[in-house]
Amino acid sequence: MSQTLPGGTYRIGDLEVTRVGYGAMQLAGPHVFGPPQDRDAAIAVLRTAVELGINHIDTSDYYGPYVTNEIIREALSPYPEDLHLVTKVGARRDENGGWPPAREPAELVQQVHENLERLGLEAMDVVNLRLGGLDTPEPGSVARPFEALAELQQQGLIRHLGLSTVTLEQVTEAQTIAPVACVQNMYNIAHRRDDELIDSLAEQGIAYVPYFPLGGFSPLQSETLDGIAARLDARPMAVALAWLLQRSPNILLIPGTSSVDHLRENVAGAGLRLSPEVVAELDAIGG
């Protein structure tokens, strides 16, 4: 069933995942804080994702906090054998809904155990270490926090390790400690800072997962994208997702939504085939 999804599959380590995945962040309440207004609708979205063949769901225990993982467990446990859950650690939520960092080794160990407990798992398929700011990497060594996660991997609690909001140099440093199976950074048509990183990871067979695929467009850039979408009789989101799939074979998508209809639209839209001429126009947005 998963073979019918746009883009086919790719590997995170030894896990074969659909390139079109699902990001569960929007299943929590407004601003990713508190419970959703309609829990049944959130459950329906997750079950529909699996029915469509998606086997790659991105989550974190700090979505809500805790809410999203609890909904995933309610909706999908016992989990299908080929379903792969990817989480992030390295931050927490404060009482005001902020996202303060939490990257000390003891904090990371606690976060991994909390993800396992709320998801009802004995081991996480993938744990991404979240570094940097909201959408921009910050300089510094990744060794101390990554070593803490590598130790949990050796204990059998984590199958594969990833990084989020990092530079090529930080990926290279982490690889001296343990294999890096995926990288999750801010990237889209307009924000092309990671072009070199994506190409480097592709050569190594490492997955790259962009977040906020439509975020941060200026009015001019949005107008350009809207114009191309209108000519193609498609939604701008569809064009943006299709461009990402065609950008590089190691790019995996995790568009999020709390609507079953939007989920179906995202999956269908990612299958839009863009001509070389259209790709060149879109490439110029980030030029």
Image: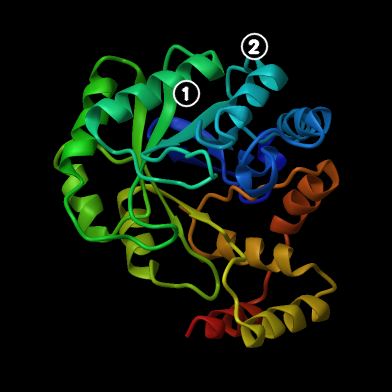
Q: Residue 241, relative to residue 151: is it above or below?
A: below
What quarter of the picture does the N terminus occupy?
Answer: top right
Closer to the camera in the image, 4 or 75 = 75
The secondary structure type at the circle numbered 2 is: loop
Dot label at residue 78? 2
Rendering coords of residue 266 (x, y %) = 74, 53
Rendering coords of residue 130 (x, y %) = 37, 45
Q: How many marks?
A: 2
Rendering coords of residue 110 (x, y %) = 35, 22
User: Image point 55% across, 33% down: which residue?
Assistant: 65
Disc 2 residue type (three-letter) = Pro
Label 1 CA crowd tier, 10 Å (few <14, some 14–19, many 20+) = many
Q: Earlier in the sequence, mark 1 or mark 2?
A: 2
Residue tagged 1: 115
User: Image point 18% across, 55% down: which residue?
Assistant: 140
Disc 1 residue type (three-letter) = Asn
User: Image point 71% across, 64% down: which residue?
Assistant: 237
Rendering coords of residue 234 (x, y %) = 81, 69
Q: CA distance from mark 1 to mark 2?
A: 16 Å
Quarter-of-image position of residue 112: top left
Q: Residue 67, relative to residue 189: is it above or below?
A: above
Closer to the camera in the image, 105 or 87 = 105
Dot label at residue 90? none
User: Image point 79% across, 37% down: which residue?
Assistant: 37
